[in-house]
Image: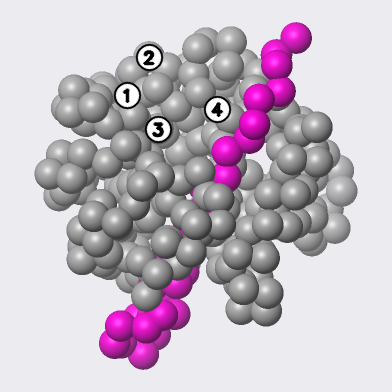
Amino acid sequence: MIPLGKLRLGVNIDHVATVRNARGGDTPDPLRAAKIAQEAGADGITAHLREDRRHISDADIDGLMEILTVPLNFEMAATEEMQKIALRHKPHAVCIVPEKREERTTEGGLEVAREENRLAHYIAPLRDAGCRVSIFIAADKRQIDAAHRIGAQVIELHSGAYCDAYHEGRLEERDRELEALREMSSYAYSLGLEVHVGHGLTYETVQPVAAFPEVMELNIGHFLIGESIFRGLQPAMAEMRRLMDEARG
């Protein structure tokens, strides 16, 4: 029996920057959001520096490294530019994600098995620099095995298909995707990988995932930032934390 430890909540602040960049200027400030989230009990802050800089900027990453007292989870594509930035800052964690310029948001998991040799060499300097390396992947055994072989310490399972099926009323698909997340969380844990889950999680979808004992962290951004327009960020986080803790308990 796996002990049900406290489930960590990582708050992704990308879409505060999306709103800021819609008009230019300095507001709303993602660093202010990060500080509020930190004070409200976030266990970490996630920020994705995209190649096209559509939301988070280099200056945002500089600022986050200065102000945060909780870990920064630096999401990045597996490019030479991003590796240099990560090695300069040495954040607590780096999460390697797939990235396509034409997508509105990250559409799926990284294809690790197909690029195993390249990714193994890519993440080695990041691990040597003291960064905890996470790989964002689908709930797929082949990808988990590849992530384990290349030396990742963490995997983050993409929960978008489960969440989409839930909200669109495709119940059989919802159940199938949730079962895949459950089985692959257990499998990854058996290999010694730390298991995180993220993408698309809402108040309605979070509890079944939060109940998986192998999952140590949920990373949630878009929903919390959207909900904060109506509730404020601290109350939006408090409700998410309540649901997570209830599922865990």
Callouts 1 and 2 close, C-beta under 8 Å: yes
Callouts 4 and 3 close, C-beta under 8 Å: no
- Dot 3: within a 10 Å radius of its alpha carbon, few (fewer than 14), some, or many (20 or more) residues? many
Q: What's the residue type where badge 3 is placed?
A: Ser
Q: Earlier in the sequence, mark 1 or mark 3?
A: 1
| Residue denoted by label 2 | 149
Where residue 109 appears, as percent x and y from the top left, is 49, 41
| Residue denoted by label 4 | 195
| Residue denoted by label 3 | 134
Depth check: 116 or 249 in front?
Answer: 249
Tell me: 69 left or right of 198.
Answer: left
Range covered by the magenta-colored residues: 1-28
Tell me: 38 left or right of 102.
Answer: right
Quadrant in the picture for residue 50: bottom left
- Dot 1: within a 10 Å radius of its alpha carbon, few (fewer than 14), some, or many (20 or more) residues? some
Residue at 58 percent across and 16 percent down: it is 189
Q: Earlier in the sequence, mark 2 or mark 3?
A: 3
Tell me: 93 left or right of 238.
Answer: left
Residue at 56 percent across and 63 percent down: it is 222
Q: Earlier in the sequence, mark 1 or mark 2?
A: 1
* Circle 4 SS class: strand
Depth check: 40 or 196 in front?
Answer: 40
- Dot 2: within a 10 Å radius of its alpha carbon, few (fewer than 14), some, or many (20 or more) residues? some
Which of the two discs, 1 and 3, sits closer to the camera?
3
